[in-house]
Structures are given as structure tokens and as C-alpha cells.
Image (spheres, rainbow, N blue to C red):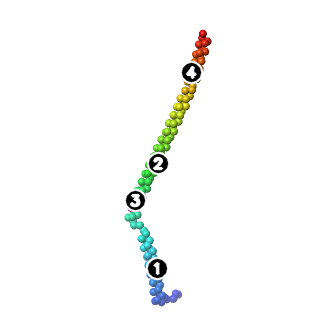
């Protein structure tokens, strides 16, 4: 069996326990000093939610602008392709018409000579 503690040892043990409890209380108090109150947390959460919503709206706006820019770029590419095709056809006709006119003139000249 353990020996019975003397009054002095019992006093020292109680004093040591009291110091440990006080140290734990100071530790808890220092942690509680760092804890944010519920009201402040609610305000911070509301502000954070508002900021996230604002940022998501800005992101959506930028996406919409980017999509519109891509659509405009695609339309410009199609318009440029059509313009080049029209220019190519115009150059082709500008080349074929004089050749056909020359052939027609030559055919008329040959026919005029043969018809005499």
C-alpha cells in the first residue's frame, strides 16, 4: 500500500496542482483572446460571400466578353475569306474575259476572211 502523505507533502501537491490549473487557465485565456466572436465571424463570412459573388460576376462578364470577341473574330475570318474568294473570282474573270474577247475577235477575223 502506498504510504500516507504528510501534511507538508499534501500541501505541496495541492499547490503544484493549483499552479498547473492556473497555467491551463492562462493557456485557455490566451487562446480565447485569439478567437473571433460570432458576430465578427458572421460579418466576415457575409463580406467574403459578397466578394466571391462579385468576383464570379466579374469572371462571367469577362467570359462573355471573350466569347463575344471570339465570335466577332470568327465572323471577321469568314468575311475575309469571302472577300478573298470574290477577289479571286474577279481576277479570274478579268483574265478570262480578255482572252475570250481575243479568241472571238480572231474567230470573227477568220470567218470574215473565209466568207469572202
Residue at 47%, 48% in the rendered image: 63
Q: Which residue is mark 4?
A: 101
Are the residues at dot 3 and dot 2 in contact (C-beta closer than 8 Å)? no
What is the distance, in whole Å, between disc 1 and disc 2 at their CAs? 60 Å
Q: Residues within 10 Å of mark 4 (few under 14, many from 20)?
A: few
The picture places residue 36, in percent across and down from the top left corner, at: 41, 67
Judge whether 75 appears above or below 45 on screen: above
Are the residues at dot 2 and dot 4 in contact (C-beta closer than 8 Å)? no
Q: Which residue is mark 1?
A: 20
Q: Which element is circle 4 on?
A: helix
Are the residues at dot 1 and dot 2 in contact (C-beta closer than 8 Å)? no
The quadrant the C terminus occupies is top right
- Mark 3 or mark 4, which has the lower sequence index? 3
Magenta segment range? Answer: 43-49
Give the number of the disc on residue 115.
Answer: none
Q: Which residue is mark 2?
A: 63
- Mark 1 or mark 2, which has the lower sequence index? 1
What is the distance, in whole Å, between disc 4 and disc 1 at their CAs? 115 Å
- Mark 2 or mark 4, which has the lower sequence index? 2
- Mark 4 or mark 1, which has the lower sequence index? 1
The mark lying in front, picked from 2 and 4, is 4
What is the distance, in whole Å, between disc 3 and disc 1 at their CAs? 40 Å
Q: Which residue is mark 3?
A: 46
Q: Residues within 10 Å of mark 2 (few under 14, many from 20)?
A: few
Name the outermost residue toward the top. 116
Judge whether 26 appears above or below 10 on screen: above
The picture places residue 87, in percent across and down from the top left corner, at: 53, 31
Amino acid at each position: 500500500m502506498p504510504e500516507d502523505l504528510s501534511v507538508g507533502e499534501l500541501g505541496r501537491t495541492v499547490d503544484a496542482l493549483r499552479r498547473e490549473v492556473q497555467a491551463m487557465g492562462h493557456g485557455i485565456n490566451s487562446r480565447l483572446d485569439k478567437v473571433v466572436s460570432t458576430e465578427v465571424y458572421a460579418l466576415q463570412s457575409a463580406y467574403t460571400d459578397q466578394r466571391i459573388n462579385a468576383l464570379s460576376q466579374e469572371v462571367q462578364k469577362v467570359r462573355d466578353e471573350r466569347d463575344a470577341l471570339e465570335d466577332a473574330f470568327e465572323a471577321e475570318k469568314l468575311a475575309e475569306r469571302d472577300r478573298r474568294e470574290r477577289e479571286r473570282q474577279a481576277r479570274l474573270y478579268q483574265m478570262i474575259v480578255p482572252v475570250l474577247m481575243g479568241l472571238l475577235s480572231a474567230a470573227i477575223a477568220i470567218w470574215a476572211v473565209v466568207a469572202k
